[in-house]
Amino acid sequence: MAVDCSIRIKNLSFGYNESPVLRNISLELQRAGFTSIVGPNGSGKSTLLKQISGILKPDQGSLEINGADMNAISKKDIARIMAVVPQNTALEFDFKVMDVVLMGRYPYVNRFKGETQKDREISIENMKYTNTYHLRDRSFNQLSGGERQRVILAQALAQQPKILLLDEPISHLDLQHQIEIMSLIKKLSIDQQLTVIAVLHDLNIAAAYSDYIVMMKDGALHHQGTPVEALTAENIQQVFNIDVEVEVSASTNKPYIYAITRNQIKKNNVRVHVICGGGSGSDVIPILHNSGFEVSAGVLSIGDLDWKISKDLDLKVAEDIPFTKISDEAYNYNKKLAMSADYVVVTDFYIGKANMRNLEIMLEPELAEKSILLLGSEEIHQRDITEGAAAELYSRITAKGFAKAVSREEMYHLLNKAGAENE
């Protein structure tokens, strides 16, 4: 049955350089609801969000906003309908918080007259709503992660959108700030009747705040529905290839997902150390663990999704407090775990000054002949928020004879082959 929807996608397909990323997507999203898109890394979640935002255009199929073809809407009109909160909130140039929020008024500003008093009033109103007005004279790049995220939300709201798109809005935040931001976004969807679409890694967060869940795998839609309908143990196993238990709260009618620690897993005695963060290891760690590998991880921020998964599986983890440079103690334990492993897997996490030491460890003399598998090397410039320092470090690492850039599929193939030979 057709629903009153703000967004209608029909038979949409898209690929990069003839490599398919999205395959025959058809989807209708309700007006003024909170929809979460979930799925393993590489499943096409962020690419689908970019299609909806108009950043990318489909190779086939159509996308309508409130009944109008997306291609027929001007960019300025799209900006008045839709606002996007990206995963990376870092700014190349520093600005005062007030100026950052005022940037959200660009679809309405006359370039010859500049911002009006009305623009300032709308910006201030949304800063107060997001509890950022007291930060108005602060430097944006000096704010904490949670503060920056609230400022970017205020900027998006200053556009006065009807649709709010969010790409991993909490992936780099600790648990307290994750709850704070998600509660604010949920309140927005209700108070301002916004259509909210968020790409999320954490299934329990998605279940708690969403009205509707879309599950993706390999560029296709697999399951969709309310949290109870979509997030079943069977569906999660099919999409994420992990075994879980799901309990539904009698008071909230929301599911809660528990990872199953399978003591009966047949071990293959191959040790893999995963260097990750920000949810980039959320698919790798459980799959390797459930396949019989002895897995360790680090350096992970306490409260991070990868940290929580590693703790649930009772793995050895090098950990540190969030939003600080990796300490010598955490660095040395990470090095110890990497040295004791047969393989080191470096996932496609965002690299900033705080976690640069997770790359620097690859150049330690003790790891000179270690088998290192690098994921997402071709995207390093997109993930580098260190003004090129991380990309340069990657080049030095890949120059090592034992460091190899691989896809996820190649990584699993190599490790499974090693596991089979070791049984």
Image (cartoon, helix red, strand yellow):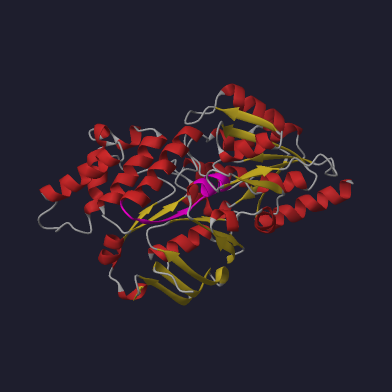
Farthest residue toward the front? 250
Q: Residue at x 45, y 60 (%)?
A: 49
User: How many marks on residues?
Assistant: 0
Q: Position of residue 99 (x, y in %)?
A: 22, 43
196 inside magenta stretch? yes
386 inside magenta stretch? no
Q: Residue at x 29, y 57 (%)?
A: 161
35 relative to 339, above or below: below
Q: Is residue 402 visible?
A: no
The segment highlighted magenta reads: 192-208
108 relative to 245, above or below: below
Q: Position of residue 21 (x, y in %)?
A: 56, 66
Viewer-proximal residue among 160 and 388: 160
Q: Position of residue 307 (x, y in %)?
A: 61, 36
Viewer-proximal residue among 106 and 400: 106
Q: Position of residue 208 (x, y in %)?
A: 51, 46
- Tell me the quarter of the picture where residue 328 sits: top right
Q: Is residue 164 visible?
A: yes
